[in-house]
Image (cartoon, rainbow, N blue to C red):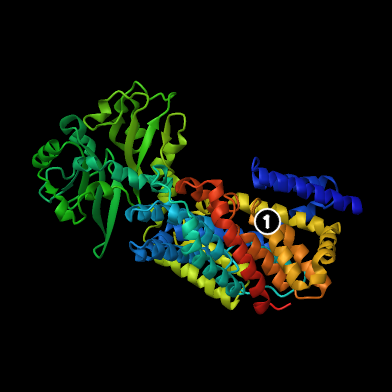
Amino acid sequence: MHDQMILVFIIIIIMVVLFMSNRLRADFVALSALVTLILTGIITPQEALAGFSNTAVIMIAALFVVGAGIFRTGLAKAIGQKIIQLGGQNERRLLVIVMLVVASFSAFMSNTGTVAVLMPIMVSLAMGIGRAPGRFLLPMAFASSLGGVLTLIGTPPNLIVNQTLQQFGYERLGFFDFTPVALAGVIVGIFYMATIGQRLLPHGSKSKRALEKPSEEQSRSSAHTYLQLSAFIHVAKVLPTSSILNQELHELQMTQRFDLTILEIMGKSQNGKIITNTYDKLAGPHTVLQPGDLLYIFGNPMQFQLFVETFGLKAMDRESQQLGEQNHLIHLVNKQFGIAEVILVPSSTFIHHSLKETRFRERYQLNVLAINRRGEYLTHKVGDESLRFGDTLLVQGSWESLETLQADQHQFVVVGRPSELASTAKASGKAPIAALIMIAMLIVMTLEIIAPVTAVIIAALAMIITGCLRNMDEAYGSINWESVILIAAMLPIATALDKTGGVQFVAQWLIQVIGSYGPFAVLAGFYLLTTLFSQFISNTATAVIFAPVALTTAVQMGVSPYPFLLCVSLAASMAFSTPVASPPNAMVMTAGGYRFTDYMKVGIPLQLILAVVTIFILPFFFPF
């Protein structure tokens, strides 16, 4: 058993070194360590796979789905925009509000997702008041870590220490049991960043990279990038007297006669005599037009006027649409349809052929609005234009068609991610539903009506059933499997440490070294060790390693394990001194123009202040 314990320690040390090197993915390292433990006979295959059925792991996976529903519907973004705008032009007030908003969001959803959603808003607001984004992004990342420990579901370490307590037969922690201590940390952290931290933040410049929009915005930004094309988007209404009625579109020969393309048709159809349904569809060659249909047409304004006069249609001006200056183009990005940029790859068979020759429209059910060739936009007879390598096509059509085009990687590169954009577009308008699901989940978990993992799974299913997420594929796609696999693989490693006597060995060593100074000293020792590890390896892995050691140490000292377990969770999550300490820290590094030393300069003082505050406050709420 002694030899096996030494082997477990060697495996853990190698694993930690690999985590710190960041050369291999964390989940791969954890799985490799797990397989090694099986092959050496330290744990059985059943023990190794037990982590994958652990309730904490299942809950974390389901929470990713719930969070995706909140983000896809635009709920988080809408709330964040409204609240952050309260900061006005004052840098300090804006910083405080930003940190409060991010901490609040992170208490109930992924801190990584929170920062991803709010970061482009924050960059825009910073530039709007003439400040560098770097003045706000690092405080935002820190706030996401501070807020994550406010609730049971805010961060994986909270769930891990809760699971450890249950595993050893102790009463589990409630949903808001973390809140009093964590709230003190949030207040101290915000006060620090608004005073000392603000002076230590780099002033920086408004870097070009920081102003770049994230890929999630690219479809809509395409619409805004090509606003000059709005002059080529027209709307015509089909009248009862129009000669175009009862004719199929291909009979009109619009491309040949007028060099126009009907992109989309919006109209109303009656179901029986009472119910009227609004439809919005892509124009097809066999589409027959009905009175009252609105035709969205792309082409030269003079040719459009000729088309309207020829068939007795009514041209709808922009004011009558009541949508503003760029109404027609922006209308083409909605729940059914989107716009994307498509780049021809060097091996594409479309090169040296026209769109008409390749039957692009029939093949992909997409309209080509324009061809961008070296910065010049070609809009006249684009179907007859011979394509060249480097051409970028601005295409419009259904989200499903855009996803199909994205899959044809031998021909094109689709800029952005249509799958995510389609999900966001189709979930728009369902923010109130997502809010109700989230609130219901939190109430059920707080009142402990059913098991927390059951409440989270029900909420995840509700997000799919109500359309906040499109389908199960999207739900699975929203899960950060690296995090889930990492936790599931790390839990059996903690089992191996306990099984071979490693947990007891470390606990006894800590008691011998600092136990004579009392539980306060041991608590401080755990905080410093945990926070040191969490600067270089994931907070999840840190919590898995130290949680059982903390509990065993407390038991051997004859004191309550609760302050020690919460100490581990808080110390693992509050990691600010390096860019690799947490995903949000890494996310803001480039956009904020930060260097490694900036994290140390701002983060280390905050780390030390929070250590003192946490160590002295914890025993008041969770006595020894």
* Residue 92, image quadrant: bottom left
Q: Tell how many labels.
A: 1
User: Regarding mark 1 in the picture, which secondary structure is present there?
Assistant: helix
Q: Which residue is mark 1?
A: 532
Front in this rendered view, residue 489 or 14: 14
In the figure, is residue 618 to the left or right of 269?
Answer: right
Q: Please provide percent x and percent y for residue 102.
A: 48, 62
* Vertical side of 346 occupied by 272: above or below: below
The residue sitting at 11% across, 37% down in the picture is: 302
User: Which quadrant would the N terminus be assigned to in this image?
Assistant: bottom right
In the image, 49: left or right of 584? right
Is 390 or 264 nearer to us in this picture? 390
Residue 500: x, y in percent?
86, 56
Q: Residue at x 79, y 47 (%)?
A: 11
Relative side of 595 to 624, left or right: left
Would residue 479 be seen by someone viewing this image from the given angle? Answer: no
Residue kind at label 1, given as amino acid type: Leu
Residue 256, relative to residue 469: is it above or below?
A: above
Quarter-wise, where is residue 36 in the image?
Answer: top right
Q: At 32% across and 48% down in the image, what residue appears?
A: 333
Task: Please provide percent x and percent y for residue 450.
Answer: 61, 74
User: Counting other residues with Cα less than 10 Å from the Cα at mark 1, is it few (<14), some (14-19), or many (20 or more)?
Assistant: some
Considering the image in quadrants, where does the C terminus appear? Answer: bottom right
| Location of residue 572 in the rendering, given as x and y in whole percent from the top left corner | 65, 60
- Find residue 406 and report its image quarter: top left
| Residue 501 makes an appearance in the image | yes
| Horizontal side of residue 454 vs 497, given as left or right | left
